[in-house]
Amino acid sequence: MSQDWDVIIIGAGTAGMPAAIFAAERNAKVLVLETAAEVGGTLHLSSGQMSAAGTRLQKEKGIDDTPTMHIEDIMRISQNTADRDIAGLAVDNAAETLDWLETINFKPLPDHPVKGQAHEPYSVHRYVWGEHLGKSILEVLIPPFESAVASGRVTLKLNTRVTALIQGQDGSVTGVTTQSDDGGSDTYSADSVVIAAGGYVANGAMYKELSGHPAYGDHSYPHCIGDGLNLGLTAGGTAWGHENYLTSFGVVMQSYDVPSKVRCRQIHWPERRMPWEIYINAHGKRFIREDEPSVDVREHAIQEQPDLRHWIVFDSTTLKEAPPLFATVSADDIKAAAENGEPMFYVADSIAALAEKAGLPSDALQETVNAYNDSQGSGQDLLGRKHMPRPVADGPFYAIRSQAFSVSSTVGLKVNTDLQVIREDGTPIAGLYAAGESLGQGAMMGSSFCGGMLVTPALTFGRMLGKSLLPLDQAARAAAE
Ligand SMILES: Cc1cc2nc3c(=O)[nH]c(=O)nc-3n(C[C@H](O)[C@H](O)[C@H](O)COP(=O)(O)OP(=O)(O)OC[C@H]3O[C@@H](n4cnc5c(N)ncnc54)[C@H](O)[C@@H]3O)c2cc1C
């Protein structure tokens, strides 16, 4: 079957749904192709935390903020590794996205916006999310998306994977080839094709090739297997962001499998809980002051450790007296898990026996514990730690293995500020656009995590493409003629 469309959108997720909604509002004839059996993509799993400067909500609460302040925060946090043009484009248009979401019934939590949560904080309160996290966004996108489908302006094909882009002799993209779940193959032609197919975190081989590390966490949307990036590259696009790989800190996995589901997250933010424990790498050494105030510094420190992991080591008095290490696993649960030999949890009567159980070098661990304990009285910790409530002294001793991993794709397709996919020489591939995680996280925040800088740009770029695609494409064609 072959049909003509104004716009084909590959993926009905965070970026694809607003692209379809806004293109339909302009009476475009839109085809949305979605490989999954449902719409929503990563919004089903995402924390849905968004950041935008100059929003109506901020103004109502008397918060002074501007896109310039937002991009300066991003460049500060990322130490100038984000792409100022593309992140700046997202930031310049983010307030309109948040304001639009509120008009379609998105409700931020009552005390929002906030400065930060899991990541390095912003300088002002500009960070919001809803009660059901990513699903709070999806819930408000579905009604306008469904009415666009009901109006006949958007045609949605689920269980339909785009497998190739069709190109004219001049390299311009003129359509797509698909494969449906029943094995059928179709082609569709269009003036513009938008890649909104997400990232590649669910593709272990691709993740390892692009980041140099296994995809340890089984925590991403299973259909995000890198099709967006691969389609764009095959069409002549170029990839960027490899140097920006970064993982989060302090996650305990359920099993030793790669990937594994997450069991619990350590409260490693000193502003929420001062550490009583010490952090040990695979060499049996401490590698950071555990009360390091910057989450960005902690995230970069774990990048340098073998297999991106550390062991949280403590004694039985700490287990009894310290504030909870995890929000969802109590001290009793830790004790039981270690005594039952559950993965990642270890207990032993001596440091040497603990090292053996946890797979750590025994002499090195003993030396590290001795040095830490010796520095207790002097207040002169070797790594500059200030909060030292007690030594690691009373057996039995515990260790919990913690894994760093990322839920997003660092590498993506390079685009220009019209969101056209570009070749290595910077020329655009006519008819081909991209938005969302297919652009890579590195573009938006470089080698750092800046709150909300994936969900908001995905929604924003989808919205912008939906609003502008036809004129842009016509302009490009006119320029080419
Ligand atoms: C657990 C978790 C928490 C997160 N929390 C946050 C957060 O708080 N804030 C933040 O900014 N970011 C967060 N992120 C990242 C953010 O949610 C994603 O980057 C963003 O939602 C991706 O949007 P997208 O439109 O690019 O992809 P998606 O929303 O995943 O949509 C892509 C769609 O394309 C479809 N697709 C894929 N390949 C094809 C193909 N070949 N043909 C047709 N369809 C295809 C997929 O099925 C999917 O529906 C989080 C991610 C995860 C996993």
Image: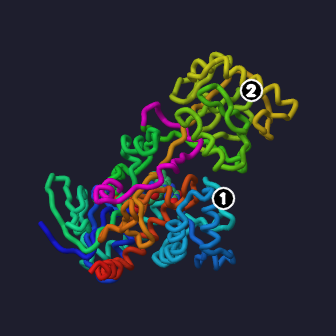
SS for callout 1: loop
- Say if residue 212 shows up in the picture: yes
Per the rendered image, the range of residues in magenta is: 229-258
Q: Which mark is residue 392?
A: 2
Judged left or right of residue 228, residue 340 is: right
Q: Nearer the viewer, residue 133 or 116?
A: 116
Among the 4 quarters of the image, the one containing residue 439: bottom left
Q: Is residue 181 above or below residue 330?
A: below
- The Cα atoms of the two marked residues, 1 and 2, are separated by 32 Å
Q: Quadrant of the N terminus?
A: bottom left
- Ligand 1 is found in the corner quadrant, namely bottom left
Q: Could you tell which of marks 1 and 2 lies nearer the N-terminus?
A: 1
Q: Quadrant of the C terminus?
A: bottom left
Residue at the farthest front position: 425
Q: Position of residue 94 (x, y in %)?
A: 52, 72
Task: State if disc 2 and disc 1 touch (CB < 8 Å).
Answer: no
Q: Position of residue 71 (x, y in %)?
A: 60, 67
Among the 4 quarters of the image, the one containing residue 161: bottom left
Q: Which mark is residue 461?
A: none
The residue that appears at 18% across and 74% down in the rendered structure is: 4
Q: Is residue 95 magenta?
A: no
SS for callout 2: loop
The residue that appears at 13% across and 68% down in the rendered structure is: 2
* Label 1 Cα crowd, 10 Å radius (few <14 / some 14-19 / many 20+): many
Q: Nearer the viewer, residue 191 or 223?
A: 191
Instruction: Name which residue type carries label 2.
Output: Val
Q: Is residue 241 magenta?
A: yes
Q: Is residue 395 above or below residue 126?
A: above
Q: Position of residue 426 (x, y in %)?
A: 40, 65
Q: How is the image coloured?
A: rainbow
Q: Which residue is mark 1?
A: 121
The residue that appears at 54% across and 69% down in the rendered structure is: 88
